[in-house]
Each structure stands twice: as structure tokens, then as C-alpha cells.
Image (cartoon, coloured by chain):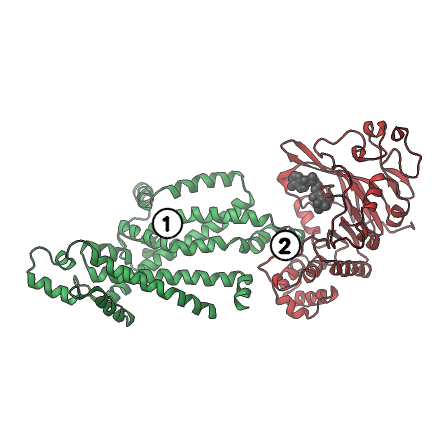
Chain colours: A green, B red
Amino acid sequence: MKQVKGRLLELAPVLLLVSFATFALVRVLPGDPARAFLGPQASQQEVALLRHQIGLDRPIISAYGHWLARAFHGDLGQSYQTGQSVVSALAQRLPVSIELMLLAQVLGLAVAVPVGVLTAYRAEGLVDRAWSGLSFATIALPSFVLGLLLIIVFPVKLNVLQISGFTHLTHSVGGNLESMTLPALTLALPQIAIYSRVLRGDMIATLREDHVTMAEAKGLPTWQILFRYALRPSSFSLITLAGLNVGQLMSGAVVVEFLFGLPGVGMLLVSSIFAHDLVMIQGVILFTVVVYVAINLGVDLLYAVLDPRTRHVAAA
Amino acid sequence: MTAQSAPVLEMHELRTWFATPEGPLRAVDGVSLGVEPGRCLGVVGESGSGKTVLLRSIVGLLPRRAIASTGGTVCFEGLELAGAPPAVIRDVRGRRIGMVFQDPMTSLNPVMRVGTQLTDGMRHHLGVGRQEARRRARALLEAVGIPDPERRLRDYPHQLSGGMRQRVTIAIALACDPSLLLADEPTTALDVTVQSQILRLLGRLRRQRNMAVILVTHDMGVVAGSTDDLAVMYAGKVVEQGPTATVFSATRHPYTRALLEAIPRADARPGERLATIPGQPPSLVDPPSGCRFAPRCPRAADRCRAEEPPLAGADGHRFACWFPLGDPEPPAAAT
Ligand SMILES: Nc1ncnc2c1ncn2[C@@H]1O[C@H](COP(=O)(O)OP(=O)(O)OP(=O)(O)O)[C@@H](O)[C@H]1O
Ligand SMILES: [Mg+2]
């Protein structure tokens, strides 16, 4: 608990800095955002009014303070495109993005863990070599190319997993999964490749350790030695990576949501950028950054659960 | 030596060669040894003489890919282990043959509780339930002299001292009540007072359980105090073997004598390895023809360099030397 508090105190300045940068970034963009939003036809008066509404006529520090204070109360302002509050727009889009990233992460780990363990156990074997080549290929491809490839293979050639738009989870679970499979796979494939390689490396090192020989000397079956004795001490890099990769997933999700037309947070961001919707952009970025930082905190804390040694040191 | 019950383990001409880029490395090269119930066989020799490989060959605990060829027989309680299918050996490991390793700081899994590591073997081999395994685990920890076993079962290895950890690994090795214990330098990594405690513990457990023990060590002092029989290894071969007392009092092989002379004195640093014998152990890839010790032997003669001496002798005391100590010096040594 003390650890959590300490980490939070460390993170406060980081969050402050990042939120300010987000806020300032939109302001220092060339041109007048109010003019950009309203378009060349709008009158000078209309522009001035909008500038006042979003605080563009005030000094940046005061405007930032105002914005931050409201953000603390859960008010990120309103889109001046649709009038919808940023928070409600996020609430609407968030479940889609979370589902996408969760599916990608679960899929990634579910495939990478057994593959990583197996390729480590039979390192330099046939499967290991084949996998190594294959994973290199998936890592090398940008996610939009990978996504397009999947679209060509599945809906176009094999005539399965049609991209007929997004089906909401509450509407039909099967339909939802069908519309999510390819996007999740696009996000997951490079993760699978990286995760399994990282796990393989650590696992090979662990399998050389004395305690594994000791477990073998106990006559335990191979699966127990691999998955109960060797996997956990080999999983620290994997977990760090899976945590850090949330950032990667988030940016990947923007591309994938756009590519597959999924109404997630990424899509929201892209469309508000196209619409010059300043308030929405700021709100979405702030939210994303906070989530990102929170997840990294969570990963740190997960270490303590996994490794009793760090838990002990922290408690002492 | 009095008549004994049948050996628990008997190896004959056991051979383990590793594949190296230079060619096969003869780590264990034709070793024949046996050990009876309730007795302790010491195996000594310099670093690299093949002691660890010998122990691991018995239970097939060597990286399969590294092995170039194996040979010989390992008869354990009527069961042939050499070349047996992995499933057969795995069933013997942990259940009928326990193992203790050198470094207790690394031989326990750092992220698993002592209790889990201790009960896993029993639950797998003996099929006992969680509660019963727990109960046995407590009794085992008590038997190896760990106070407050209930608490220790919930501890992680890093919460225990080195001596304590080695007691835990011994408890793990004994969990299924094996008839043979293979201990690979179980005290080398411990400080000197703990060393003698662990050796006494091993001796007591061996007598209580009438268990056979093979104790690998560098330390002739350990051999003198804790073993009944002794095998001296040099470059993958046994060069002298017999009852420990006989080998000590009537040493025949010059290498054994060199080892005995190299026993650390009382003022030596604890845990110190054997003082050096002049010269280097030979290459195991391309061993010298004749006696492998000849290049370092003060008594070596032409015959030693040409012909390999057989391991022979009487009354269970055997040695591989053309001109053993106690016999007249060979003619060549005089020149
Ligand atoms: N996996 C392996 N691959 C190749 N060579 C090996 C392997 N394991 C051991 N050896 C070689 O086998 C020989 C015997 O090694 P071993 O570990 O049995 O010696 P030891 O007597 O136990 O020495 P120490 O006292 O240092 O523990 C050494 O030359 C070693 O380099
Ligand atoms: Mg060794």
C-alpha cells in the first residue's frame, strides 16, 4: 500500500506535465483553431465568441488551470461540433476500444505463452526455427498492411469473417466477435511474435538454472516443470512488455479501428482531428495519457505479486 | 569388510561422452561402482574429473543434445536405468532416488513456496492428498532439523539462510523415502560450521532410513568423516576404490596420495578447494595413452605412458597403477 502511494506521488508531476503539454500543443498549432473549426465563412464575431468559450482569449496558464480544475470534476468540456460532452463520447466509445485491446492482448498471450515455452524447450528445433522466421515477418509488417493482408485472406479469398460493419456486444455476442476477430488478430499478431520470442529467451535461461534440474530430479512430468516451475520465473520480461505494449496497442488500435470502421476511442480521436474539434482532441488525449500511466503503475504492482523477492524487499 | 546385503545400485563400465567441436569428451569413461543399503560411498577427485556427470548419468539428468555416446549398465534395485525410457527413469527420480545439489542458493525455485516444492514430489509420485502431503512435509522439515516447520512451509526460499535451504533440499530429496540419495557436494557452498551440521544430518538420516548415499566431494576431510567406502576419480575414471579406512591407511595410487597430502590444514580458509597438485588434468577429448595420471605422476615409468593399468586388487581395495605405493619404485623413476 505504501508502495502504491509512493508511486502515485511520483506520477503526479508526470501527469501534470503531460496534461499541460496536451493542452498547449493544440494552442501552438499554426492558425486559429476557432477559425479552423468554424471555417472561412464564419464572421469575426462568431470566431471571437468561440475563442472566448474555449478560453483562447485568456493567457494559456489561466486557461489551463481552468480546464484542469474542471477535468478534476470529471468535466472535459463539450464538443463544439456535436455539442456532446467529451466524457459521454468517451463513455460511448471506450467499451469498443477496451474490448478490442483486451481481445488482442488475451489472444496474444494465449498463443505466445505456449509457443514461447515450447520453442524454448525445443530450442533450435524445427518448430523453433520455423516460428522464428514467421514471427520476423509479422513484426516487420506495419499494422495497416497486416490488417489489409488479413482482409484479403479472410473475407475476400476465404469468404469468412465479413467486415459488414460493427455489431455491438449487447446486440449479438456472435456478431460482435465476428466483427472483432480480424481487428483483434491484426493487433495481436505482432504481439504474439514479440511475446513468444521474449518468453523463449528468458525460458531458455531459466531451463539452465539449478532449480529446474532439481525439479527434474524430483521426477515431475515435463509439463509441470515447464509450466509450474520454469514459466513464472521466466515471465518478468513478458509481463513488463505486455504492460508497456498497452501503449503500442493503443496506437495500433487507432489505426485498426479506422481500418475496420470500429467506433472506438481511436476512431473518435481521428474524426475529431479531421473536424478540428479542439476540446474533444484535448479531452481524448488527456484521458488516454491518464489511462496509459495508470496501466504502467498496475504493471509495476503486478511485479510485486509475481516475485516474492521484490515484495519482501518493499515490505522491509 | 564384512558381508553386506545386495547393492542398491551397481554400475558397470558406465560411460558418458559429450559431443564437442573437438570430438567426443570422455567425461565418464568406464566407471564400475556399487553402493549397499545404509552405506555411504564417497566420490572424490579434482574439478572436472567427472563426478557430477557420473551422478547425473545414473538418473539421466544430462542435456540429451550434449551427449555423444553412452554405455555401460546401471542396475538399480533390479531395474536397468541405462538406456531406459524417459518415463521409467522419471518414475525412479524423486521417488526411489533423491538428489541434493551443491548450491542451495540456486537449487530452490525462487518464486515457489517451500511447502509447494516439498509436497509436489509426494503428490505426484505417491498420490497423497493436499492435507496428508502437508502433514508429511511438516514431519520432514522436523526430521531435517528445521524449527517451526508450519511457518517455513509458507516461506519462500529467500527467507531462509543457506544452511536452512540445504536442509530444505535434503527434505525434498527424502520426501518419497528413497532408497538411494545422490548428493553432489552438498556442503561446498556452506560455511564450515554449517557444513559439519549438514554432514551429521545426512549421516543420521542415512542410518535411520537404511538409505544408501553417494556423496560427491572435493574435500578429503569430508570423506574421512562421513563415508564408508571411497572411489577416487581422475579424468573420468576410477583410479582407486575401497573401504575409506583402507584407502586412507594403505593408499596405493599416487594420485590418491597427492589428494591426501592436499587436505587443507586447520588454518586453511573454510570451504577451500583441494590444494593444487602440480600439473594440469589431461584433456578428456584426447587423453594420454597409458595411465592418464602419468604426465603428473612422480613415479611414472615408460610402461605407465604406454599401457593403461587395469583397476585391480584384493579384498575390495582396487587401484589402477603399475607401480602402486608400497611396492618398490619403478626403475624409470630412479633415472
Ligand atoms: N553438458 C556438457 N557438455 C560438454 N561437456 C561437459 C558437459 N557437462 C560437463 N562436461 C565436461 O565433463 C567433464 C566433467 O565435468 P564434471 O562436472 O562431472 O566434473 P566434476 O568432477 O563434477 O567437477 P567439479 O568438482 O568442478 O564439480 C568436464 O570436463 C566438463 O567440462
Ligand atoms: Mg561437480
Q: Which mark is residue A127?
A: none
Name the image quarter holding residue B201.
Answer: bottom right
Determine if residue A87 is in view: yes
Name the image quarter holding residue A292.
Answer: bottom left
Left or right, A42 with respect to B283, comes to left
Three-letter residue code for mark 1: Leu
Secondary structure type for disc 2? loop
Q: Which residue is mark 2?
A: B106
Residue sitting nearer the eye, A167 or B286:
B286
> Which chain's residue wears label 2?
B
Q: Is residue B166 above or below residue B238?
A: below
Q: Position of residue A81 (x, y in %)?
A: 16, 61
Q: Position of residue B330 (x, y in %)?
A: 90, 31
Left or right, B2 with respect to A38, comes to right
Q: CA distance from mark 2 to mark 1?
A: 40 Å
Q: Position of residue B317 (x, y in %)?
A: 89, 43
